[in-house]
Image (cartoon, rainbow, N blue to C red):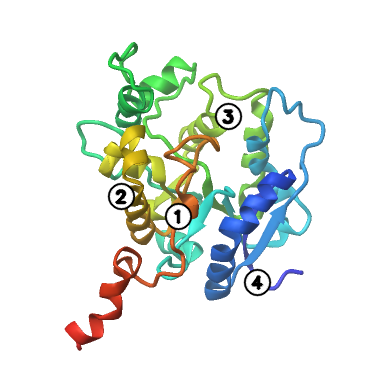
Amino acid sequence: MKKNNKALVTLAIGERYVDEFESQVSRSWRAYADKHGYDIIVLTDVIDKSCDLSRKSLHWQKLLIGLVPGVSDYDHVVWMDTDILINARTAPCVVSAVEQTGSDKIAVADYNSTLSPLEDTAERYYILDQLFRKNSTKIDVPPLHMEDVYKNLGYLKPVDKYINTGMFVFQPKRHNDFLSQCYAKYEADSADGSFENIPYSYELQAEDMAVFIDERFNMAWSKVVATHYPFLYLREFVMENPEVAVKCVNVYYHNAWFCHFAGHGQHPINKGLMEEVQQSANHVIEGLAPDLWKSLDLNFSD
C-alpha cells in the first residue's frame, strides 16, 4: 500500500537474491525509508516476460520499473541494485538532493570525481585488476579513456563519462517514455560485458537526460579500493591480514551514503566484505576501536 510519494525500488529475482537482500541489505533500507519517508518495493518477478534473458539480461528491466502498476503512481522513484548498503545514520534524502539541483532530469551519482585529472576510474581499475587480482605482470591492452570505450563500441555522439546505473532517481510520469525507449532500442547486452550499464550510461548523456548529484549516493566499493586501498587487490595480503580489509571496508561505509558492492558474487573485492560492515556502529571510531569509543567521554568530556 502506497504511504509516501517516493519509493526505493529494486528487483530480486530468485530465492538466492531475495535471501541475500533480506539478510544483508534490507535492514539498512528500512532504517533509511523510515527516516526520510520512503516506501520500499522489492519486485520478485520479471517485468518483460517476452525478453530472451540469455541475450538481454535481467539488469535491463530496471528501465521498465516505472511502468509497473503501483510504482508508476509515485512522484519520485529511486532505483537501487540489491547490493547497495545504505548508511542510514548519515545519508541525506536523495530526492531532496535531486530537487535542490532544480533539474527535472534523471539523477545519477557523479562517479568521476574521486581520482586525479591524470587518470580515470577505468584506467586505475583496469591496471589493478591486471597486475594484482590476476597476479599478472603484463598489461596486454592499454586502458582506454571512456570516450574511446564508447567510440569503440559504435556509439556516435561524443560522450566521456562513465555512469554507474545501479542507482538513479526518476519521475515515472516524466521519464517513463525515455526509459522504455532506451530499453526497446537494444536487443542484447553490451559487447563489453557491462550488461545494460554502458548503453544506458551512453543514452543518459547523449540525450542530455542526466543530472549529477553527490558521488556518495552511489559509492562503489571497487572504485574506493582502486583509489585508496589498492593493496586489497593482492589476494595474499588480504588472506594474511583480514583485519586490515575489515577496517578498510568499515571506513568506506562511514565515508559513503549508498555503499555499492557491485560485481559478481565470487569477486573478493566487490562482494566478499559486505558482510563485514558493522552497520550498528554509530561512528567510524566505534567500528575500528570499540574500546576507545567507550572511553571517549572520559577523554573528551565536551
* Most foreground residue, 205 or 194: 194
Q: Give the residue at mark 1.
A: 276
Q: Nearer the viewer, mark 3 or mark 4?
A: 3
CA–CA distance between discs 3 and 1?
A: 28 Å
Residue type at mark 2? Val
User: Above or below — where is 247 with respect to 151?
Assistant: below
- Residue 78 coordinates in the image, percent (x, y): 57, 56
Tell me the number on the disc at residue 244.
2
Name above or below for residue 287 compared with residue 168. below
Sequence-wise first label, 4 or 1: 4
Kind of residue at disc 1:
Glu
Return the residue at label 3: 195
Element type at marker 2? helix
Mark 4 or mark 1, whichever is nearer to me = 1
| Secondary structure beneath label 1 | helix
What's the residue type where badge 3 is placed? Phe
Whole-angstrom CA distance, mark 3 to mark 4, is: 32 Å
